[in-house]
């Protein structure tokens, strides 16, 4: 490193993901001196020396490491049971199943979007169907209008309408040795009506799925649905279409190590999580990914310093802005305009110059085509837009 100031390695003051850890760089004195604040999970990673880049470790050691100064952080476990799920909906009137403080971490169990009888009919042995899935399908009577089993809602203290809920996705694990893919979606005439569900074995050690003898699919698990309650006047909305509350975005970029920012519309935010995917392509064209059960570890933070109209995300390499609408053109217009507005504000540019940058350096992608509202997202490379 020599005498290069720490900011040359870690970037400007602010929060970011570094080598898979959530860190915040902040000034300590008026001079060019900074310190790094690690989350509790990050501190554990540091002690375990889980770094791919030893230069990063050296930089952190030279700067000094301290726990994230979020008051009264606690760890919670939230299993999926008949009493802890919202079956097929998001609603501001839903009763919270867990209350947490800003900065707390929650380990959440989520269940496969299917029914035991259908899984068994497709070839899953009865002993391999989770008992929790059987209990929820048979005991929960308040279902719909959607079909996803969502764990929650989680009430985050201090969150209210106009705020933003920051969801740091710290870890995601496969809970089953199998997933399934259905067949419907964008071009359902290609489906054989008698064999719509295919069970796909998952190798949790290698993190792969054998799709065919000569085709191996790498697994990158993520939650297809993560969202908060919609505005109260929206009533009870289906878990199927994504929207300003996030929800069933089916965005394959939201793997462990990324952060999701969701505009809050009601007191407590009322976060729900589910629809586990082991792997998915952009578009999710047959309406399903490799659907499975997942366990995730999430940190939730109330942000009152930023205000958003649409969900936004951040990976170690990109900012992601989004748009959803029933019409693909309109969804694309929303996403591209959100990218223009983000870059213009981030860089202090005119919207015209930001528009140019979106055209020459950013990728506009179809997130999904099958959830009622279609989704589009724009990948904005941090390497290009950062000052």
Image (tube, grey):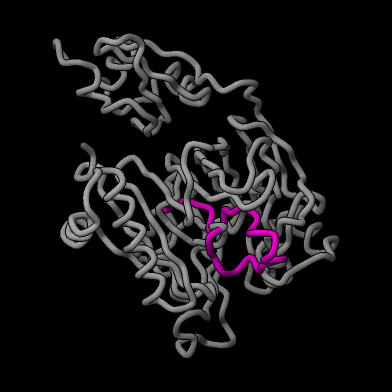
Residue at 16% in and 59% down: 360
Q: Is residue 346 magenta?
A: no
Between 26 and 177, the residue placed more toward the observer is: 26
Residue located 68% across and 43% down the image? 268
- Number of callouts: 0
Q: Position of residue 357 (x, y in %)?
A: 19, 56
Q: Which residues are magenta?
A: 219-244
The structure residue drawn at horizontal position 44% and vertical position 78%, both measured from the top left corner, is 327
Find residue 314 and report its horizontal and vertical position in percent: 39, 45
**Residue at point 64%, 59% (across, down):** 231
**Does 158 sit above or below residue 139?**
above
Tell me if I can see residue 178 in this picture: no
Q: Quadrant of the N terminus?
A: top left
Tell me residue 119's x, y (percent). Answer: 66, 68
Q: Position of residue 92 (x, y in %)?
A: 71, 56
Residue 249 placement, left or right of 273:
left
Left or right relative to 224: residue 258:
left
Residue 295 against residue 249 in the figure, above or below: above
Residue 351: name its quadrant. Answer: bottom left
> Front-most of 193 and 74?
74
Residue 49 picture quarter: top left
> Which quadrant of the figure contains the C terminus?
top left
Q: Is residue 161 visible?
A: yes
């Amino acid at each position: 490193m020599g005498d290069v100031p720490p900011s040359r390695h870690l970037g400007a003051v602010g929060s970011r993901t570094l080598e898979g850890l959530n860190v915040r760089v902040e000034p300590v004195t008026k001079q060019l001196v900074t310190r790094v604040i690690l989350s509790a999970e990050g501190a554990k990673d540091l002690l375990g020396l889980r770094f791919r880049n030893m230069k990063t470790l050296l930089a952190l050691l030279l700067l000094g490491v301290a726990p994230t100064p979020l008051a009264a952080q606690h760890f919670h476990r939230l299993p999926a049971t008949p009493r802890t799920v919202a079956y097929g909906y998001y609603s501001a009137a839903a009763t919270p199943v867990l209350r947490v403080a800003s900065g707390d971490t929650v380990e959440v169990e989520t269940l496969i979007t299917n029914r035991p009888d259908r899984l068994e009919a497709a070839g899953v042995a009865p002993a391999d169907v989770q008992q929790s899935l059987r209990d929820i399908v048979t005991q929960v009577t308040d279902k719909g209008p959607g079909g996803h089993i969502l764990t929650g809602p989680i009430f985050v203290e201090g969150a209210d309408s106009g705020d933003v809920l920051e969801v740091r996705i710290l870890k995601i694990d496969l809970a089953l040795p199998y997933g399934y893919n259905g067949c419907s979606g964008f071009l359902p005439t290609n489906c054989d009506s008698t064999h719509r569900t295919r069970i796909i074995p998952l190798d949790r050690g290698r993190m792969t799925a054998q799709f065919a003898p000569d085709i191996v699919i790498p697994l990158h698990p993520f939650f297809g649905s993560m969202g908060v309650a919609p505005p109260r006047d929206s009533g009870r909305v289906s878990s199927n279409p994504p929207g300003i509350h996030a929800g069933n975005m089916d965005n394959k970029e939201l793997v462990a190590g990324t952060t999701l920012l969701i505009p809050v519309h009601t007191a407590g935010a009322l976060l729900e999580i589910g629809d586990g995917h082991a792997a998915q392509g952009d578009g999710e064209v047959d309406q399903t990914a490799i659907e499975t059960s997942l366990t995730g570890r999430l940190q939730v933070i109330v942000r009152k310093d930023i205000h958003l109209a649409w969900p936004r995300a951040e990976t170690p390499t990109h900012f992601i802005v989004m748009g959803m609408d029933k019409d693909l053109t309109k969804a694309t217009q929303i996403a591209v305009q959100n990218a223009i507005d983000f870059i213009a504000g981030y860089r202090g540019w005119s919207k015209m110059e930001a528009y140019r940058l979106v055209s020459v350096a950013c990728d506009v992608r179809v997130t999904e085509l099958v959830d009622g509202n279609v989704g589009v997202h724009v990948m904005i490379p941090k390497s290009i837009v950062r000052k």
